[in-house]
Structure formats: structure tokens, C-alpha cells
Amino acid sequence: MSTRLTRGGRLIDRTAPVSFTFNGRKMTGFRGDTLAASLLANDQMLVGRSFKYHRPRGIVGSGAEEPNALMGLGEGKRFEPNQRATTTETFDGLVAGSQNHWPSLEFDVGVVNNSVARFLPAGFYYKTFIHPRAFWKHVYEPVIRQSAGLGKVPKEPDADTYEQAYGFCDVLVAGGGVAGLTAALAAATAGKRVWLVEQTGAWGGRAPVDGCEIAGLPAQAWVDQTLATLKGMENVTLKTRAMVSGLYDHGYALVYERLADTTPGDGRPRHRLWRMRAGQVITATGAIERPMSFYGNDIPGVMLASAVRDYVVNYAVSPGDRTVVVTNNDDAYRTALALFEAGLIVAAVIDVRPRADGALPQLVREKGIRVLEGRAIAKTHGSKRVTRVSVCAQAGEGAVLEEIPCDCVAMSGGWSPVVHLWSHCGGKLNWDDEKAMFRPDPARPPLGDKGQPLAVTAGCASGAMTIREVLDDAHAAGGGTGEAPAASGPAESPMLAAWVMPAGATPAMRAKMWLDYQNDVKVSDVQLAAREGYTSVEHTKRYTTLGMATDQGKLSNINGLAVLSDALHQPIPATGTTTFRPPYTPISFGAIAGEARGEIFQPLRRTPPDAWHDANGAHWEPVGLWRRPFCYRKPGETVHDAVNREVRNTRDKLGLLDASTLGKILVKGPDAGKFLDMLYTNMMSNLGVGKCRYGLMCNENGFLSDDGVVARISEDTWLCHTTSGGADRIHAWMEDWLQCEWWDWKVYTANLTEQYAQIAVVGPNARKLLEKLGGMDVSKETLPFMTWAEGKLGGFDARAYRISFSGELSYEIAVPASQGAAFWERLMKDGAEFGVMPYGTECLHVLRAEKGFIMIGDESDGTVIPQDLGLSWAISKKKEDYLGKRAQERVALADPDRWQLVGLETLDGTVIPDGLYFPAEGTNAYGQRNTQGRITSTYWSPTLGKGIAMALVKHGTKRMGEVLEFPDTAGKTIKARICDPVFFDKEGAKQNV
């Protein structure tokens, strides 16, 4: 049985007992335990069921590699499924439950699948669930949906909070073992800003468990000394319970920090996701021990040898009273010695190698422990717990030589460096045949934008397996000078790769050798995939589900690759590896979302004068993520009346529009002009300083994406105005091209939208108001149309743009956001004598429609090109290319039958309902009635006293004066005449006064 030892346990505090429940049963542990250690201490060997066959599953590992011990943790609003018991710390009040069984863990009816396992091999679903066809909806799909998944979905909103933060450093060291500590110390001593992060709550990694000496000190004493030195250095940041989950381009890394898992409800964020930028990343992530493939290697009690050692040394837990160690390398002998020192029985060490004569095997023999050379496990006996093993010759086919009673099997099939972070950004691997591992190729690292290495590995992550090699490699990785810390440890003999045990195992034996414990993938499944033509490792992965469980193949992949290679009669490097993708281990959805939940999932953006609008009758509408006044209603006034009043007042006197929501994107750098020439359809590089120009943006498919006025601020700086809803999208679009396509162009962009309040001062009295404020010459001669100037207006820091979206004399005044509310109030106060009145977005739309100005999202819908809208004048004939140019030359976009923008006037002066289509003769290939156009914008014009509309109509510009007849939503016939889309002041006299 598994139990707590009376002495030892380097990570537990025996003075701090804790109680928790597992499947409703109360258990006890100590502070410092993992949940897995606490369960083993309470003799809870069975912890779950496998996915496919519902076979009993016990704890296999002691860390992130664990495939079996997945728990549902917590209750109610703090319930979370699929949490690893091996990485979950035990705390008082913890509630845990096993998964994937019914009605109970001990008695699971799903285990019936195991009885028919021969009929459910790899890929059986591809061959089974297609016949008969009618079964899919009524039989297969309901059964699959009922069986899918391991844990239960949380039913209540998460009660915890999460946050995200940003960090910057010269060197980010992933892993706090002796390699990480050595590399961090070397880098910090060189004066670099260092972050050292360790995914567990303890520093030192395996060294203190394995008992080596460093710099003349026991490993733990050296770790404590080095930590004290690092803590005293101002340029070092230390983080435990923090994992580098992914490495991305440009030194970008995500660090997942667990802050309050053991103290739920204490007010702190539960998790924090760090967005890191590092000059270099050192991956000191260690190595993972591999299991061995033998009959029954999935029975509870069969564990990794290193995990058994961890539980004994770190937590004073005995996984069994009588253990058999099975190995192909010397490292597993350390487990035999640790068990012996703890007073436990090691029944035998079974070594597949013909000779085991290294220092560690010799030391084990000196303790009186049997070492069986050239032997293998023919079969492991037991159901919910190991009871004995049958021993055979490794070179044979499984003839039993003897049986050894035991309740624990500690297996070691060698070690695999943790190369995930190295591989995330394209670092390449080499196969080391001597050590039977893929290890990073230092000549082919992941590269940065200038060809520099983004990452370097250290210690076991490099494939260094002795303490001396580990420290030398880590010291060099950190850029250390002089000698690395001295270290000593016993010499180790070469391992022997043994992918199947015994070598000549029969088909029946291979059908019970497990590679992927969680997904029930066996040696025979991989061999079947090879026979059925799945020669690519990626195809085999998906056909068998090898490595697709929640551990992402940390234990299964290398063994599976080796079995596939053998079945294909090719070397392992020829088979290759599957793709390593972030995150390294799962991270919580809460951490990914951070603070973006509830009311701040999409924060409501408010302009600086928002409070004034609210207090003065604003009728709100959402625009993008902003709220903007639709109009300003007076008592007893309808919305329609308010809009008409605002239009008339702006045309006749003076209107103010809060245009702060317009996108304002700064584009700066030596290549900024060239960049903008590619983004806009017209030229921007030849725009003079102090000048403005209207521009169009198209996507790569040629369709109109956004529009706005561009102002040239200086020789290398432009300010691009975008639509209110397009600012973030266009800024991301710019960065996409700069980072992915034109990465060598020297251009910097910044979204300044919320840095400025921008007020449109519009109407015949606009100049009079600004002249009253004083401080700037805004005359027609000094500040002509489509120019801008900076200065002081009424004491406010201002940039005045002489532009118009209304057809009236108009200025848009940008002031710092902090001055926006005061500037608005000053304009309202000083403008009173000129008949000032605020107007909202609907008035804005009417004003622009009267002038025939387009609106993105109304006249454009993702299928419209500038030429459709009569905007060919905004497409430069001088430049060779812009985004969308070639697409616009395609047959479909150059078709003369494309719909064109026109104006519409109803014969009776009424307003046409929005969005109507104009029918045409005949039907299309789908039997639908043909159409010849649609309404894009429609309004009542108080200026003209009639309804006006803009529409896209087939051959529209050639059909001026023609009357269209079409039904409205009520079935009545509407008659409208096609006309010029500019309804008011076509010559532009009013805006040029």
C-alpha cells in the first residue's frame, strides 16, 4: 500500500496539517504537498479512468507530464475540471473529485469498452460511424456526445479575478533548477536585467532529490546560497509558480503565474498572465523521463522511476511497500537507492541491458538489491493495483522466467529534453542516437528579426544529462565568464534504447502495451496505422490520437515515434516529430481573458465632453465601442424634430460636433511615406507639411475598407484619421503589414485616438467663433481649405484642421483629451451670440448625404470598390501599386455591369425605407428574383424639404432621370428618380467662404 513515511519530506511542513476531500471522502495532508502526494499518502492509488476504454488509472508522474491524475477541483463558482493532481498544491478545504466514470470511480460501467477493445482499435470510428447513414443522427452522434470529454463543464460564473501585466527584461530564464539558477546568476553578474521563473513552488529542480554536490556543498545548500545571492541583486526578478507557456516572435513570451490557487477568496487575482519582451530567452526547462512499453504498463502502481523518487524524498510518501524497478539506464538506480534509504523494499532492479556495471548499479548491488541484467517485464498483474510482475528475457518473446510480487513498479525508459519553448519559434532538433533523444541543434536556433538567436537552451534541456555537463552548459548559456560551479556525481554507463519489452513481444502483448495513457493508444495501434498507410507522424497522431491528450504527448510521443519508425523500417530522424505548440501546459481561460469580463469585457468608451452631453439631452447611440449623441432632444421634442432642428441650425448658423471618436493614427519614420502610398489608393508621400488630403484604403481583395483625412505633420510624420469604428482595426491592419510583410521598413505607428478631443465647428458662423476665442489666424488666406495649423485658441493648446464633412465652412479642432471638456464648454459659451447648437451623429449623416459624401458601412459593405462609388478621382495614376490594385483589375471587379452610386428622389418627396432592393426581370440560378440595385442611405432633408437617398444601381450613372419602381416593406410601390448624389451646393461655395 502507499503511505506517509515517518521521516523525511524536504518540501512538506509536518507542523501544518491540512484536510481536504476526494470524491467526498475526507483526507489529510501537509502544507507543501501536491494533491497527488496527499492522495498517495492516503493510499488512494486509483485516481481516474482512461478516455476510451475506461481502464483504471493511477498516478504515473510527479509534474506537468502527468496524463492520468486529472481532477475536478473546487465547487460552485470555483469549480474547474481537468486539473493535474501532480501540479496542484494541497490546501485546507480543497475539494477534489475524479473524472470520466459512472456511477463511481471504483465501479465504472464504461469499462465494458475494455472487454471489446479488440473491436475498437485506432481509427475504428472512421470505419464504423459511416454506415448505415441514418444511424449517425439517431445513434452515433448521441452516444458520441454523451461519451465525449473527460471533465464536467462549470455551470456557474467564475468567482475569481484574473489579471494581465507587462514585463521587460534582457534575459528571461525559464526553469528554476540548478541550470536555471546558474544561467541566471551568470547573466545577472554581467549586469543584465534577468527574470527567473519556476513553474513549481520550490527551487532547485531534480538536483536536491538526486543528491549531488555543487561547489563543495550539498545541492540544496548550494541552491539556498545561490538564491540568496540572486535575491540581493536589484537587476533580478524571481518568480515561483510561474511558467513560460509560450515563446513567440521578437522575444515575446507569455508567463503564466499562479498567485492564489491555495487561498481562494483572499482578494488577490487567482492568476496573472505576463506579456514579456525579452532580449533573450534561456530555456532551462529540464527533461522528462519516458515510460517503458510492456504488457500492463498502465495498471495503477506503475510509475516513472523519477516520480517514485520525488514522492519519497520530497513528500515522504511511499508509493508502495515493495517496488520493482525496471530500466534501460543508470538513473533509475537512484530510485532504488532512495527507496532503500527510506527503509522500503526493492524487490529487484530489472535492467534490459546485457550488462549493468556502472557506479550506480554497483552501489545498488552493495545494498543487497537484486539486479537482473538482460531481463524485461513480460506482464504486469493486477486490476486496480499492481500485485506482481512476470519477468522474461528482453531478447526473447516473453517466456516467463519468474514472478516477483510487488505493489509498485518504477520504470525508466530514458529522458527527453523539454524542447517545447525552443521549438515554438522554429528551433530545430537533432536526434542523439547514443542517448535516444531529440535535442536542440545550437546551429539552428529560433531566430529574431536580424537573424540573431531568440533562445538558447541550458542544462538537461540541451541534452546534458550529468551534473557536470548541466552546470557547464548553463554557465555558458548565461554568458558566464570563468569556470562554472564545480560539481560531482557518479559516472553513468550508456543507456540501451528499448522501445518494446520484450523485443520480440507477440501481437497479443503489444495490444496491452500503452503509449498514451489518457487516450488509450497502444503499441499495436501505431503499428496498425503504419500498416494502413499513415506514414507521416502527423497523420498517425490524428489517426490514433497519440499525443492529443491534455498532456500533449509529453510521455507518449518519443516512444510512439520510435514504434512508428520501427514499423516503417526507417530511422527515427526520418520519421521526425510532431509540431510543438504553445501553451506548454494548459493555462486558465481566466488568465487569457484577464480583466476583460463583465462590464469591462468591451469597455464603453466616452469622449471628454461626455458628461456635458449627458446633462444636456443627449440621445445616445453606440458607434464602435463608443457612445455618441445621436441628437440632443429638448423637452417635448421627438428625435426626428431634434435632428431637423440641428440640421437647419448648422446650415444657417453654427453647430458643434464632438468628433473625438474619429481614429487618429500616427505614422512616423523614414519609410512612412512609402508605407502610406501602399495603404491608400492615392499618393500621400508627396503631401506637403501643413496640408491635408482625403484618402481611401482598400483591403488586398480590392474592396473599400476605410476612408479619412491624412495630415502631414512633419517631414517624416503623418496623422491618419479613420472612421470611429475603424481605428483599432486599421491600426492592427497597419501593424499586420509592417510586422508580417514589410518588416524591414522603418515605420512606427501609434493609435492616438483617445489622446485628443476633436471638436467640429461647423456653419456660416464657424470662423467668427474661433476669431472670438483668439490666438490663431483662421482666415481663408492663412488657413485655406485642406490645411492645418497649431497654436493657441482661447488659451487652449490646439491643432486646427480646415476640413469639412458637412459642406459648410468647417474647422475640426484637436486639443489634448485633458482639455477637451473645458474646450467644449468654452465653445458653447462663446458661441451663444452666434447661435451655437450641438448636433449629433444623425445630423452629421444628413449633412453629408446632402453633399453626396459616402459613409463607410453604408455605401460600402465589403463588396464595394472605390470605382463603384464614383471615387476614381481618389485613385492615383502616378504610382505602380497599392493594396487592392491588382485585385481591382480582376474581371469581376472591372465588370462594366457593376452597380454604381447615384442619388434618388421620390416623386412624392417621401423618405424611402432603408435597405430596399430594386427588382429586375427574371430569376437567377437559385430561382431568386434578379435585382438591379439597393438603397445605401436614406434621410429626410430639412434643407431641401424632401426625402433623399443614395443607392447603388446597375449602370446607374448612365440612367440619370430614369424612374425606378420598387415595393417597400409594406408592399406599396415607390417611385424614385435617379439623380446626381450631390443634392446641395454642388459647387462647394459654402465650404470655401
Image (cartoon, grey):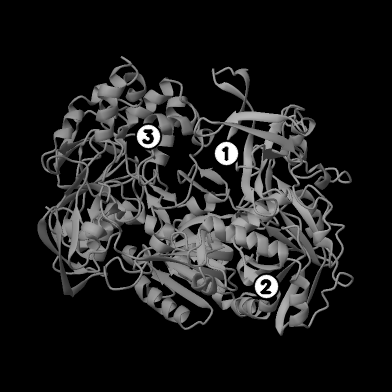
Quarter of the view holding residue 109: top left
Left or right, 465 with respect to 514, comes to right
Front label number (1 vs 3): 1
> Which residue bears the numbered disc 3?
545
Give the residue type at disc 1: Gly
User: Which of marks 1 and 2 precedes in the sequence?
Assistant: 2
Left or right, 968 with respect to 181, comes to right
Q: Please report contact status of discs 2 and 1: CB closer than 8 Å, yes or no.
A: no
Percent position of residue 340, x then y: 20, 59
Percent position of residue 235, x then y: 54, 79
Give the residue type at disc 3: Thr
> Which residue bears the numbered disc 1?
915
Task: Judge the density around disc 1: few (<14), some (14-19), many (≥20) Cα neighbours within 10 Å.
Answer: some
**Residue at (36%, 76%) from the top-left corner?**
221
Q: In which quarter of the image is the C terminus?
A: bottom right
- 863 is higher (above) or lower (below) than 81: above
